[in-house]
Every structure is written in C-alpha cells, then in structure tokens.
Image (cartoon, rainbow, N blue to C red):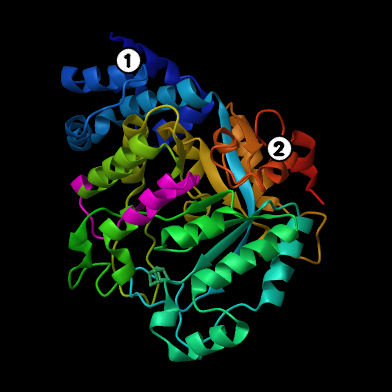
Amino acid sequence: MTTFEREWESLFTQSGSLGVLGLLGYDRANAASLPPAIEAILDKASVGETISREEALLLIDMKNEYLPYLLLAASKLRERGKGRTLTYSKNVFVPLTQLCRNHCGYCTFKYEPGEGQLFMTPEQVVDSARVGAKLGCTELLFVTGDKPELKYPIYREALNKLGYDTTADYLIAMGEVGLNENIFPHTNLGLATSEELAAFRVTNPSMGLMLENISPRLLQKGQAHYRCPDKVPKQRMKTMERAGELRIPWTSGILVGIGETWEERIDSFFAIKELNSEYGHIQEIIIQNFSPKEGIIMENYPPPEFTEMLKLVAISRLIFGDRMNIQIPPNLNPETYPLFIYSGVNDLGGVSPVTIDYVNPEAPWPELERMEKLVSEAGFTLRERLPVYPEFINEEFIDPGLLPKVRAFVDAEGYMPLQESENGRH
Ligand code: SF4
C-alpha cells in the first residue's frame, strides 16, 4: 500500500469525507490503485510544491476513480497553508446599476432602460449600507453592469444630472458614502483605469474583477462573450495588472461551464497565477459554476457536473499552492458546498442577510447557522473575515487613511473577533 493509499484509507474514517466519497460512489473495499505518474504529481503537490501546466493537464485526463486521491492532495495542501480554518464574510449586495453594454450569454443581472430604475439613488445606497451595518455586515458589495454610459444616452444624462460623468465616478462617490456608515465597500467595477483604481483604493480595502476565462475564443459569434467589449481577456488582465501596481488586494476567478475547454480553464488559472507571481496582490480565487436559467441566451447549456467542479477546484489548489484563498460560492451550490471542503477550498464566500425577513431581525443569519454546523461537523472552524483577507491588512496594501478603520474591526489574527461576529456589529 502506498502512502497515498494509506492516507486515503484514513480519509474514509472521517465522517465528512466519508460523506463525500460515499456520495461519489466510491467503495472502500475496491479502491483503485493510483498510476505512478499521477501519484508523483500528487505527492509533490501535497508537500507544498506547486504543479506545472503540463502536470495539471495530466490530472484533467485522469479517470474519475482516482478523484479521491486528488481531493486528498488538495485537502492536505490547504491544511498546510490554512490549517483547519474556513472563512466567510457578511455582505450586502448593492447593484448600483443593472444596465450594461455587454451581452453575456449567461447573464441574469442586466436589464434595459424601462425595465427597472436606471441606477440606485445615493439615498438607496445609504439605506443599504445602514441596514447592512446594523445587521452586522462588513462588506458593501458593489456590483454593476459595464459602462452603460457608453450605450444608453438616457442613463448618461441622468448620471450627469446627479453630477457624475461615468459609472466609475458614481461608484467612487458611493464608496465614500458607504464607508461613512461603518461598512467597507468592495467594488466589482469591470475594466478600470489606473486613475479610477487609485480613487477606489481610498475607501475600498479590496476590490475584484473575475477574469472569467483567458480565452479570446469565447468572444466569437455563438460564444458566451460575443458582443462583450468588456470581456476581452487581455483588457481584464490589464485592469488586474494596474491593481497590482497600485497594491490593491484583488479578488478574481473563473466562470465554469460557459463553453470553455478544460485546457482554457487551466490556462486561465496560470494567467492569474503569473500575474500574482509578479504583484502578489491576488487575495482570492473564486471558482464560479454557470447555472442555466430560463430566458438567458445559454438557457439550454448544461451546468458543470459536481465531480467536474470538485476536480477543477482541487486542481486549482494544486496550481495556486497552500497560501491562496480559494472560494466556492455557497449560494450557487446550496446543497453541495460543504463537500467542496474536501477539494481544498478555504473560503465559503459571502453570506448576506438580504434574503432574511427584516421583520424578524432576531434571527438574521439562518444560512450562517447551517454553515457553522456543517463546517464544525467536518472538523473545521469557521471564522468571519472582512472583504479584505487578514494577510493583506497592512501598510503596503491598504490606504493609510483607511487602515486604522480596518484594523479597528479585526482581532490580532485579522478576523472579526468571535463575539462580535456572532452577535453582529453596531
Ligand atoms: S457584464 Fe455580462 S454578466 Fe455582467 S451585467 Fe453585463 S451582460 Fe450581464
């Protein structure tokens, strides 16, 4: 029996992993032996050596019967860098505008003028920030469509009347408004200039832009990013590079199941990894699964399979190594997300009170209670973090005017103090 096989044996004796392996249909008595080439890759990965593109591609091709070994290697690597702590954040979602100049095949967010308000008013933003802070949220998650001012004159004029030329200008101002309410803006703007990013940095301890995929092929007719000028991968990489130059902690990641190949997924990971090797500012990788909905261009596309996601997440851990924060969004995997603990994730994303009944504020976090229970059953500790991860809370990565405020929220380890994260912060 090889070392890996012995460890896999022990994996079966843990209740949570027994659950995941049982669910995948693995039979302890008939465990498959690992081919030496795969074992060599997993062996080196689980002691902290990252893997090459070629090795990652080899793992893609391996049979599903070897998946438990891959999960074990990813779990070991996560524990090397992150111990048995899993994190989450409490956020309030602020869809500042849902107009957008792109036409992503999977979009469920965008609408046209006349189908809803052009943008949230400053008063609505303040309300969201206040309610969120009152309910104990620390993240004001700004999400918008991309550059609607370049497509819709009616939007541009309304924005001008409010005193702003661009969505970015408006977002920058609303970041200040949010921060005044004692909650931290985390903005997902889309493509941005260095000047814009520098202005965001004053109030945003972290920001984000999903790479989605590095392949320009997805811009072609019939593909997910056809007629999407903001989805040109080179441009998205450029925005993230600017963020690196400006030392902005950055969340990125990929979308899975939008018509990309396995090779393109791996190349996307390596593109982000290369950027991070140069700037060290990528704080988190989100691996987000496509989920079909009625009425979208891709409504008949199949979503990625569960085992495909497990495999991809585990390979991402092996590519990024033990220190990277890797997240699977729980809201997109409501039933299966605890099982991703066994594929090497260490973050379970944002939990939001927006779905709660505001009339019953004494029980504002039903999802959180369930998450805490599942995580503890798996033998892990759940800690609340800010939108910015603990390792980035320092002079290098946070604006000097903002840093004291960020530090005032967290304990010595950079997490929300346990009592406050349980009771909410006011
Ligand atoms: S960028 Fe794409 S996904 Fe985002 S709002 Fe625009 S069309 Fe929708």
Disc 1 marks a residue whose amino acid type is: Phe
Q: Nearer the viewer, residue 62 or 413?
A: 413
Q: Quadrant of residue 12?
A: top left
In this rendering, does residue 43 appear at all?
yes
Task: List x then y, in percent, for residue 221.
Answer: 18, 73
**Magenta stretch encompasses residue 248:** yes
Depicted 40 relative to depicted 289: above or below: above
Secondary structure under tag 1 reads helix
Disc 2 crowd rating (10 Å Cα; few below 14, some 14-19, many 20+) is many
Q: Which residues are magenta?
A: 238-263
Q: How many marks?
A: 2
Task: List x then y, in percent, for residue 189.
Answer: 47, 63
Residue depicted at 72% across the width and 32% down the height = 411
Q: Which mark is residue 410?
A: 2
Residue behind mark 1: 4
Secondary structure under tag 2 reads loop
Q: Which is in the foreground here, disc 1 or disc 2?
A: 2
Disc 2 marks a residue whose amino acid type is: Val
Q: Quadrant of residue 33?
A: top left
